[in-house]
Amino acid sequence: MFAELNELLGASVEKPEQGKLTLLCADKTDASFLLHHFLSFYLKAGCKVCFVALLQSFSHYNIVAQKLGVSLAAAKERGQLVFLEGLKSSNDILFGQQHQEQTGEASPFQFLSGDGSNLKALYEFVRSVLSPASSRDSWKCPVLLVDNLGILLGLGVRLTDILDFIHYCRVTVNTQLKGNLVVMLHSSADSEDEENELLVKAVRHQSNRILWAEGLATGYCKDVHGQLSIIQRSSWERKAERDHLRIYQYKIQDRNVVFFARGMSAAVL
């Protein structure tokens, strides 16, 4: 379990925060453990989760979730988790298995068909699955997770369309539904992908909280796998306050992640 990370974030499954945008960013390292943490956390908290998975298959996420004590298959069956598998949906669009012909509705990945579509269909999908079906809907606040938003650039989506998608999701999920939005991105200071870095900067500017994972400057170490910066942004109502920054190093284990202050690894001490 990622109990330590919950403590660092001040998170509680009994009362999850609401109306927040969290950016998870990986800088020359694999920060997927952060996404797996938030996915398992919100499911355990009883939230309705829409997971737009652009990077891996359902089976991959499910295997990791089972190590954390969560069954994604069971969450799907009870209607708590809506999993949009980007790899499969993209394959269906690109190789002729048209979603609209089968269901009468436009596919959330219609933009891949080359007809000039933007991300409106994807947004409408998110809005429809996260809006309460009735007043008796027993789930807690809705949550949208996206892994990895930058892949949309590689699929030919314009930067402006991605930013519009995030804007409308923030208005709907964060403001209207009082839910949370968690976005994964990759970044690198020496990257030549200017559009991706512009996307990172734009989402970072809008985020309430940033978890920035990066590899060690000294290279590989078996006892310290990376460094995590947790940035809690000051609210618009408290512009005079500075952002709160905390920095930890971490070691990834099979079912857990251990955090410690810089230079305080058990191997060093």
Image (cartoon, rainbow, N blue to C red):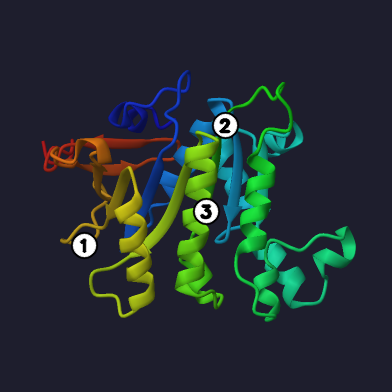
Whether residue 241 sits left or right of residue 114 in the image: it is left
* Mark 2: amino acid: Leu
Q: State which tag comes first along the sequence, 2 or 3.
A: 2
Label 3 Cα neighbours within 10 Å, binned few <14 / some 14-19 / many ≥20: some
Give amino acid for label 3. Answer: Tyr
Q: Secondary structure at mark 2?
A: helix
What residue is drawn where x is 52% and y is 53%?
168
Q: Nearer the viewer, mark 2 or mark 3?
A: 3
Query: What residue is disc 2 on?
Result: 43
Q: Nearer the viewer, mark 3 or mark 1?
A: 3
Which SS class for mark 1? loop
Residue assigned mark 3:
168
Say which residue appears at 81% left-offset and 64% top-offset. Answer: 99
Q: Which mark, residue 219?
A: 1
Rounded to the nearest whole Å, what is the CA distance between mark 2 and mark 1? 35 Å
Residue 262 falls left or right of residue 134: left
Cα–Cα gap, marks 3 and 1: 40 Å
